[in-house]
């Protein structure tokens, strides 16, 4: 079987030397993968339990049009999310266009002029800079008189408790925590560590609203930040919880009073959650959520495989090959634009869709430098599918994520290395 796989790989453009090296790396990951499979089992049963409890039925898989009154499928989706993430309520809609929109919505719905946002895990994800007004932009929260303050993580990646205490003032209304590293090279935060930080700020002022940007974190651990005290968790459906099937959407799960505000902001005061036709997406939302624990499992395995493959070649990988995982992102620092480009070309070549196109750096809206992206995805831009991107600036780090199946993630990562080897950018170790 091994020989046959090697032949297939050869036909698909992978040299024997690269293949052998990759197989050797994978051999060392058996125990890690077993632990991940246990987490996937746990989350799968958690989701299944919620589906049975809410008696999900065929009628929930259909959709509504027009105003979308009495959309039982939409209500079922929201009940499922709230149940699985352990929150009072949830807003899960195709009208929430992406993760940034969901985060912007959660903020603008729950803040009023004079309020201050305090980010305690450092600078938020790039696209939020314009939402908040850290970078000047039309319609930002800053224009509405909402101010922003930030406390960076300490050198070792932990929360700066002293700094947080000093930064909280009478205006502070909402605490922002980002679970995943996003486009930074700091460590991702575990749910337990997030829980400790939440307990700390609630001790200072129990009325502070804690919002966690949960993008890329869902189902990586056996619990979510909402189960350790977060008042709202927010994410994108074309990442983890959509399971690769959701074609659009975002979610906000949390305290019912906060979700109510979000609903009034998403639609309009007076209408709230009652409108918003689900069109045809209920089936994909529900089935995707059902698939998500195993899809996330595949993605995390791919990330760990990539970490070990590149770490052994001498590159700095974040997280490192042995670290526990709290999100699906793998960063590799290349300090070389050519290597970053070659990596992305390999991922693209390995894709089921658009494998024939070549990724090039471009000025992507919302980002402050050029970005190169590789994604041959069924859902455009879905980063739960095998994808890689990186800003064209030091440290020329690639952020790799996704893979609907582990065999595909593995092949994609091997192709990234193959591409680098072809261009003479790396030396592949000999396996005896
Ligand atoms: C992807 C991401 C976002 C934004 O989501 P989009 O769907 O790309 O708008 C926000 N925060 C983090 C940490 C992310 O990874």
Image (cartoon, rainbow, N blue to C red):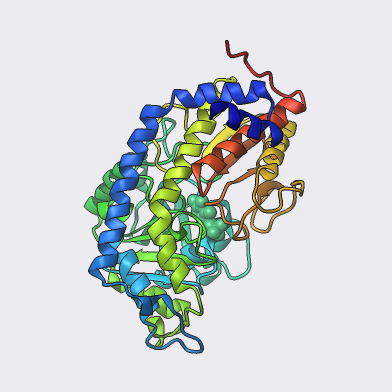
Q: Quadrant of the C terminus?
A: top right
Residue 386 appears in view: yes
Of 425 and 6, which appears nearest the observer?
A: 6
How many labels, in total? 0
At 31% from the left and 58% from the top, the residue drawn is: 47
Q: Position of residue 58 (x, y in %)?
A: 37, 76
Q: Is residue 300 above or below residue 21?
A: below
At 65% from the left and 30% from the top, the residue drawn is: 7
Q: Is residue 79 above or below residue 334?
A: below
Q: Position of residue 30 (x, y in %)?
A: 40, 28
At 31% from the left and 51% from the top, the residue drawn is: 43
**Hey, which quadrant is residue 170 in on the image?**
bottom left
Q: Position of residue 22 (x, y in %)?
A: 57, 26
Q: Tell me: 96 left or right of 19.
A: left
**Hey, which quadrant is residue 274 in on the image?**
bottom left
Q: Tell me: 277 left or right of 335.
A: left
Of 311 and 105, which appears nearest the observer?
A: 311
Residue 184 appears in view: no
At 47% from the left and 28% from the top, the residue drawn is: 320
Q: Is residue 309 above or below residue 231?
A: above
The single residue placed furthest to the top in the displayed view is 432
Q: Position of residue 95 (x, y in %)?
A: 51, 74
Of 32 and 84, which appears nearest the observer?
A: 32
């Amino acid at each position: 079987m091994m020989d046959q796989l090697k032949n297939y790989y050869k036909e698909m453009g992978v040299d024997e030397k690269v293949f052998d090296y990759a197989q050797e790396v994978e051999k060392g990951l058996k125990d890690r993968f077993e632990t991940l499979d246990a987490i996937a089992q746990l989350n799968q049963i958690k989701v299944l339990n919620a589906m049975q409890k809410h008696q999900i039925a065929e009628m929930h898989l259909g959709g509504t049009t027009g105003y979308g009154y009495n959309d039982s499928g939409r209500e079922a989706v929201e009940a499922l999310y709230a149940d699985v993430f352990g929150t009072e309520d949830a807003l899960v809609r195709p009208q929430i266009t992406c993760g940034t929109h969901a985060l912007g919505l959660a903020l603008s719905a729950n803040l009023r002029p004079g309020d201050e946002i305090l980010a305690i895990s450092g600078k938020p994800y790039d696209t939020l800079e314009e939402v908040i007004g850290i970078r000047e932009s039309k319609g930002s929260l800053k224009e509405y008189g909402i101010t922003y303050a930030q406390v960076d993580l300490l050198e070792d990646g932990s929360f700066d408790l002293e700094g947080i205490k000093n930064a909280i003032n009478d205006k502070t209304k909402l605490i922002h925590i980002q679970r995943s590293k996003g486009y930074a090279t700091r460590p991702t935060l575990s749910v337990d560590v997030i829980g400790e930080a939440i307990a700390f700020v609630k001790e200072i002022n129990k009325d502070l609203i804690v919002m966690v940007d949960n993008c890329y974190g869902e189902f990586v651990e056996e619990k979510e930040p909402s189960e350790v005290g977060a008042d709202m968790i927010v994410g994108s459906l074309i990442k983890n919880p959509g399971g690769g099937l959701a074609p659009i959407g975002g979610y906000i799960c949390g305290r019912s009073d906060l979700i109510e505000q979000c609903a009034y902001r998403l639609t309009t005061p007076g209408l709230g959650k009652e409108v918003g036709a689900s069109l045809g997406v209920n089936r994909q939302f529900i089935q995707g959520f059902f698939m998500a624990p195993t899809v996330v499992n595949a993605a995390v395995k791919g990330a760990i495989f990539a970490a070990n493959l590149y770490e052994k070649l001498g590159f700095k990988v974040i997280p490192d090959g042995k670290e526990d995982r709290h999100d699906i992102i793998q960063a590799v620092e290349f300090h070389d634009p050519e290597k970053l480009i070659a990596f992305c070309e390999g991922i693209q070549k390995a894709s089921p869709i658009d494998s024939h196109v070549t990724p090039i750096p471009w000025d992507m809206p919302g980002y402050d430098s050029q970005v190169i992206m590789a994604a041959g995805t069924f859902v455009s831009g879905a980063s739960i599918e095998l994808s890689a991107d990186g800003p064209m600036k030091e440290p020329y780090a690639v952020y790799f994520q996704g893979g609907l199946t582990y065999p595909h993630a593995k092949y994609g990562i091997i192709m990234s290395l193959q591409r680098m080897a072809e261009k003479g950018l790396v030396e592949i170790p000999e396996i005896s």
